[in-house]
Image (tube, grey):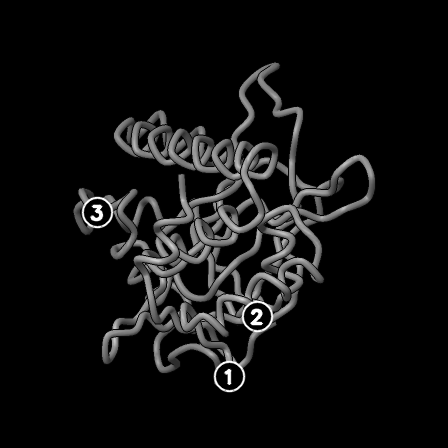
Amino acid sequence: MAKGAFNEGKSPEDIKIDLIKKTHLFEDLGEKELKDVAQYIQLKDYGKGEYIFFEEEAEPGIFILTEGLVKLIKETADGRSIIVRLVFPGEVFGWIEWGKSVPKFKYTAMSALPSRLLYISNKDFINLAVKYPAIAIKLTCDATHNLLQTYEVLKSIASGKVEERIARLLLELAEKAGEKKDGKIIIRLPLTRQDIAEMTGTTVETTIRVMSKWKKQGIINTERGYIEILDKDALESLVL
């Protein structure tokens, strides 16, 4: 578990309610409703590199990331790992089962940074959805968005050129987590070349070759331990 990574001084229940207030799924609820909702939600902390669940052991339920970064990883039939999605604060992952509606494909979730999450079990979420239908509607919208995002990742891996896939990934990371400074976009995420390879369906060697080429061309810089995009237009020209 992550220790000392988050603010202290409040009771776990107060911290949980504060985090729920900041989550868009619950932003329309009043104080009384928030306290009611909090009874169904668990607060979970994970250290960097700690697994939240494994694909073969995963149980239905909804996770909402409030702080940190989470990788969603899928194992392929030939034993390779693909990072199908990075989860950023405010985003939802997991799934709900209803009757015989059980997802065929699941994934492993790992905390890439010290992370804090709100968790709602499958049973508790169904109870919440009955009491607060707006929450169910928002979750459906989030789930649809995430499904389409994953589809685009898999489609890109299946058909796109390697440089196009890596360029698209860097542009997406820049949009979600980039910091603009002195004409550059700085991506301060703990991503290795292996991670980038797994997110784009290629090899580490190819990833290193492509990024070294872009570095020589002045498109990116990686000397400071993180990725700096120096020429965004050049990356955009590679994305079809």
Label 2–label 1 contact, CB within 8 A: no
Name the residue: 25% across, 55% down.
21
Say if 128 sits above or below 112 in the image. above
Residue on which the image places disc 2: 212
Name the residue: 54% across, 67% down.
213
Number of labelled discs?
A: 3
Q: Quadrant of residue 234?
A: bottom left
Amino acid on which disc 3 is placed = Glu
Say if 188 sits above or below 58 in the image. below
Q: Which mark is residue 27?
A: 3
Left or right: 202 as drawn, with respect to 20: right
Residue on which the image places disc 1: 223
Q: Nearer the viewer, mark 2 or mark 3?
A: 2
The foreground one among 73 and 41 is 73
Q: Quadrant of residue 13?
A: bottom left
Residue at far top of view: 100
Figure quadrant of the N terminus: bottom right
